[in-house]
Amino acid sequence: MSSVKEIKLPSAYTILFTIIAFMAAMTWIIPAGEYQTVFNETLGRDVAVAGTYASAEANPQGFIDILLAPVTGVQSVIDLGLFILIIGGFLMVITATGAIDAGIDRSVTVMKGREQMMIPILMAFFAMGGTVYGMAEETIPFYMLVIPVMIAAGYDALTGVAIVLLGSGVGVLGSTINPFATVIASDAAGISFTQGMALRIIILALSYIVAVIYVMRYAKRVRNNPETSLVADKAEANRKHFLEKKGKQDSLEFTTKHKIILSLFAATFGIMIWGVASEGWWMNEMSILFLAASILAAIIGGLNEEEFVTQFVEGAKDLLGVVLVLGIARGIGTVMDNGLITGTILSWGEGALAELPSVLFVNVMYLIHLVLSIFIPSTSGLAVFSMPIIAPLADFAGVGRELAVTAYQTAAGLMNLVTPTYGVVVAALAIGRVSIIQWFRFMWPMLLILGAISVTALSIAAM
């Protein structure tokens, strides 16, 4: 038995690098091909033209290309990576003021006996962000807020990860006005994003309800019997990592200064959400916001210049590994694009969908987008690439194009809850200290339920 316990799973870095090598090998096997593209002024980018797929001269990826992929991947996520590093600095500065530790103690005291009610409330918040504007990268700073509260309440780190990742994920799966999924896909399909809205609201509501019930049941089981936690082997280490109060008294006073700093903390997130949803903010603006908030928190908290710089750099250093994981994940798509096999994989899907009965059409389309989402985890990237090709096929099957959009977004939303090629997933698991295997063990029943909800809704709508 001891030998079994000594077996260690490969790290996220190794898993992702292995996938890069595998896709590079596929460029030697899968025929090269590509679609003709035209510039779409509304989308501001080139889109593929249906029926224009043609073979191309092969460009198989070799050893140097495999090594280069994560390098170019990191370069392509530099804006997101910088945002994450600044978030790390921001969180460490807030922590150095003592506000988070005191706030956690107060939260646990106030919610004594009612901690489980935090789960549906927080998941509703994240689901709203997901359905309205595709909340994904923006969730990253919330993990360091939610996970300690869940651990202090008697749950585990995986519960905290699930609240944020699954909460926002079901929102994206049931996107209603998400500009990075529904709006882009609808425009690429040549329809208004309001078409199919009712169906998406139904999928969103059902998905949220079952997700909340699932997380609450798991959390209750872990609290009653900690040994059932899927991360029980890391319980003590996680408590030290997320909760340890070095050099502080056991009973923390929650001062006015702490309240002001935590108000600033909450206001920063609120401003971020407002900026992204209403003002078109993205990584640069969000980075500026959190940098300014870090400086202000240090002033309020009484940190001097040396303390501020030291804490900020330490916090950024803690999340450097997350940035590297994101870059390696992005390298997978780089190898596929450079190897000219992305278009071929999509062409196979285009051929499989022609002239199918309506119900079978939407289900096959759903399955194809499940697979495509592994290789193209970006919802906007997948929408722009597949919808101009896939949506016109719905006409031949007698299916409304809005169902093609809904099939795409529900499939992409489902797969992006677990796929290791999606940077948000690997970043969340890295922060929560949860392995991809542990996360999949937790999620596979939920994936089946959420998939059944989407497929049933699509099938009924296609009849």
Image (tube, helix red, strand yellow):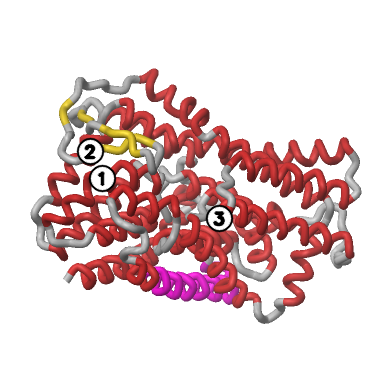
- For mark 2, what is the residue? 49
Classify residue 364 by image quadrant. bottom left
Q: Are marks 2 and 1 in contact (CB under 8 Å)?
A: yes
The C terminus: image quadrant: bottom left
Q: Secondary structure at mark 1?
A: helix
Amino acid type shown at disc 2: Val
From the image, give the main secondary structure of the stretch colored magenta.
helix
Q: Between disc 3 and disc 2, whose residue precedes?
A: 2
Amino acid type shown at disc 3: Ala
Please name whichever residue, 97 or 267, is drawn nearer the observer in this view of the structure: 267
Q: Between disc 1 and disc 3, whose residue precedes?
A: 3
Q: Secondary structure at mark 2?
A: loop
Whole-percent x, y for residue 69 in the image: 42, 27
- Horizontal side of 239 relative to 346 (left or right) equals right
Amino acid type shown at disc 1: Pro
Q: Is residue 434 magenta?
A: no
Q: In the image as oriented, which residue stretches furthest toward the top?
A: 64
- Horizontal side of 35 relative to 354 (left or right) equals right
Question: Residue shown at 87%/51% (left/top)?
Answer: 301
Residues rendered magenta in the picture: 203-228
Q: CA distance from mark 1 to mark 3?
A: 26 Å
| Label 2 environment density (alpha carbons within 10 Å; few <14, some 14–19, many ≥20) | some
- Horizontal side of 178 relative to 153 (left or right) equals left
| Label 3 environment density (alpha carbons within 10 Å; few <14, some 14–19, many ≥20) | some
Q: Between disc 2 and disc 1, whose residue precedes?
A: 2
Image height of 446 relative to 331, above or below: below
Q: CA distance from mark 3 to mark 2?
A: 31 Å
- For mark 3, what is the residue? 277
Please name whichever residue, 438 or 136, is drawn nearer the observer in this view of the structure: 136
Whole-percent x, y for residue 195 in the image: 32, 64
The N terminus: image quadrant: bottom left
Question: Of the numbered discs in the image, which one, if any, rests on residue 388?
Answer: 1
